[in-house]
Image (spheres, rainbow, N blue to C red):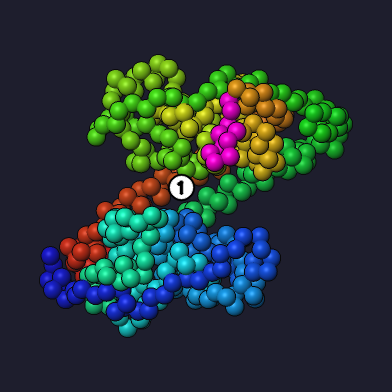
């Protein structure tokens, strides 16, 4: 412990500012008497996705909805107390939130709200443990204010928060760049392959097809005609080990790949067996979330990786007739996802039926036009991969610093400036 550690003191959350619970009426979200207006209404899932700064929201309130809730100011720390326990994000906009979220407003003379956010992040597992034991896990306000926070003098809080939030600011900036690049690729996809405003479209005739009018020379065909393989991962789950090869399920997927760190591990023997059965992923495979929120994630595998897959993930191996990135973007298109409903079974747990999915009709543009789109868009998508790798490194470094800074183990007055990225 550094000398500064002696200046740290233990406080409760309500010693450092005001703590209050959100408020909302439990009515259907399509109730126009409350919802639909100019006031953002954030929910627990929005807090989880925000990671650091919360600016997106799932719903909006009108004047009547606002009158039955409360508009919290930017700078409020949102803490989830149900569902995803102890997720945190700092409001970047005025917004309402439900009673499953607690708002903390820091006393500016006592606490830096960013420091408190990072402190809760270090206590997350402990808070989740305290929430168990009831019919529905929750972390009531009364429980939340029983936790002790080790708090240094305000200037030290500011310095620690500056260091950690610099990482989060970079991550957030990279996320925005990824979104912009992805939107550019998707926009070009829709312009060329949905609205048919591709280069030279002025000179092309349109003909009837099972999917409506399409340019002459384009084809409609089943998914199996553009894929050498359509399958899913293993239908049995090998024993978990502390060390070994990663095995991914749909919960380990994100929009651009597999989160290797969250995967459980299996033995080399089990992995080799799954590899022989083609339950592993290869470069340029298109992986899709098959179970649950089907097609929630759909991406191209960037490189060969020794990762086994469970059956909740489907594997498409495009052949020479279809470019992998174009296929992935096509499957994420809202119109295509809407048509996919006929190939999904189950209400509680929707699931793509692969036997039927093989016959799902897709539009097949000429390969030369696909290659033209790929030359324009694949550099954008490759930049997204690089930015994602940067963010993984930034998160890893931040998470290594976090407990050492929050415990006072690292004396921030002696840290070099290059500590801040």
Q: Can the viewer see residue 159 in this picture?
A: no
Q: Can the viewer see residue 249 in this picture?
A: yes
Q: What residue lies at 58% left-to-right and 52% top-to-bottom?
A: 180
Q: Is residue 131 above or below residue 40?
A: above
Which quadrant is the C terminus positioned in? bottom left
Farthest residue to the top: give it. Answer: 276
The magenta segment: 345-354
Q: What residue lies at 56% left-to-right and 22% top-to-bottom?
A: 230
Lateral position of residue 131 relative to residue 210, left or right = left
Residue 9 horizontal/vertical position (percent): 19, 75
Residue 38 horizontal/vertical position (percent): 64, 71
Q: Is residue 376 above or below residue 106?
A: above
* Secondary structure at numbered mark 1: helix
Along the line of sight, the residue nearer the viewer: 138 or 101:
138
Q: Main secondary structure of the magenta part?
A: loop
Which quadrant is the N terminus positioned in? bottom left
Image mark count? 1
Farthest residue to the bottom: give it. Answer: 109
Q: What residue lies at 53% left-to-right and 64% top-to-bottom?
A: 42
Residue 147 horizontal/vertical position (percent): 26, 68
Among the 4 quarters of the image, the one containing residue 221: top right
Farthest residue to the front: give it. Answer: 135
Q: Is residue 110 above or below residue 376?
A: below
Residue that label 1 marks = 387
Q: What residue lies at 67% left-to-right and 46% top-to-bottom?
A: 187
> Does the magenta run of residues contain 348?
yes
Lateral position of residue 128 relative to residue 21, left or right = left
């Amino acid at each position: 412990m550094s000398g500064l550690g002696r200046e740290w003191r233990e406080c409760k959350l309500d010693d450092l500012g005001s703590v209050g619970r959100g408020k909302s009426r439990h009515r259907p979200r399509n109730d126009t008497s409350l919802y639909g207006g100019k006031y953002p209404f954030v929910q627990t899932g929005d807090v989880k996705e925000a990671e650091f700064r919360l600016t997106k929201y799932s719903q909006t309130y009108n004047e009547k909805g606002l009158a039955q809730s409360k508009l919290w100011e930017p700078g409020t720390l949102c803490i989830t107390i149900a569902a995803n326990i102890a997720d945190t994000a700092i409001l970047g906009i005025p917004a309402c939130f439900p009673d499953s979220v607690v708002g903390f407003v820091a006393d500016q003379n006592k606490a830096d709200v960013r420091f408190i956010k990072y402190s809760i992040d270090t206590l997350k597992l402990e808070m989740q443990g305290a929430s168990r034991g009831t019919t529905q896990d929750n972390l009531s306000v009364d429980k939340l204010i029983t936790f002790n926070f080790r708090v240094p003098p305000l200037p030290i809080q500011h310095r620690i928060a500056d260091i950690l939030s610099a990482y989060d600011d970079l991550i957030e900036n990279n996320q925005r760049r990824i979104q912009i690049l992805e939107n550019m690729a998707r926009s070009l996809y829709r312009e060329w392959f949905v609205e048919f405003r591709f280069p030279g479209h002025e000179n092309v005739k349109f003909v009837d097809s099972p999917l409506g009018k399409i340019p002459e020379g384009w084809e409609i065909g089943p998914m199996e005609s553009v894929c050498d393989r359509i399958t899913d991962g293993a239908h049995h789950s090998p024993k978990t080990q502390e060390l070994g090869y990663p095995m991914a399920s749909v919960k380990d997927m994100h929009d651009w790949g597999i989160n290797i760190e969250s995967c459980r591990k299996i033995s080399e023997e089990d992995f080799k067996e799954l590899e022989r059965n083609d339950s592993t992923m290869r470069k340029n495979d298109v992986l899709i979330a098959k179970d649950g929120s089907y097609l929630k994630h759909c991406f191209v595998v960037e490189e060969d990786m020794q990762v086994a897959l469970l059956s909740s993930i489907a594997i498409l191996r495009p052949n020479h007739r279809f470019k992998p990135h174009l296929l992935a973007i096509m499957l994420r298109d809202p119109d295509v996802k809407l048509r996919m409903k006929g190939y999904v079974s189950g209400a509680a747990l929707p699931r793509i039926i692969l036997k039927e999915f093989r016959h799902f009709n897709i539009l097949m543009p000429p390969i030369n036009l696909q290659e033209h789109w790929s030359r324009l868009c694949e550099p954008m998508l490759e930049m997204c991969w690089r930015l994602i790798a940067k963010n993984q490194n930034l998160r890893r470094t931040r998470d290594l610093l976090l407990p050492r800074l929050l415990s006072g183990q690292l004396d921030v007055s002696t840290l070099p400036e290059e500590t801040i990225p």
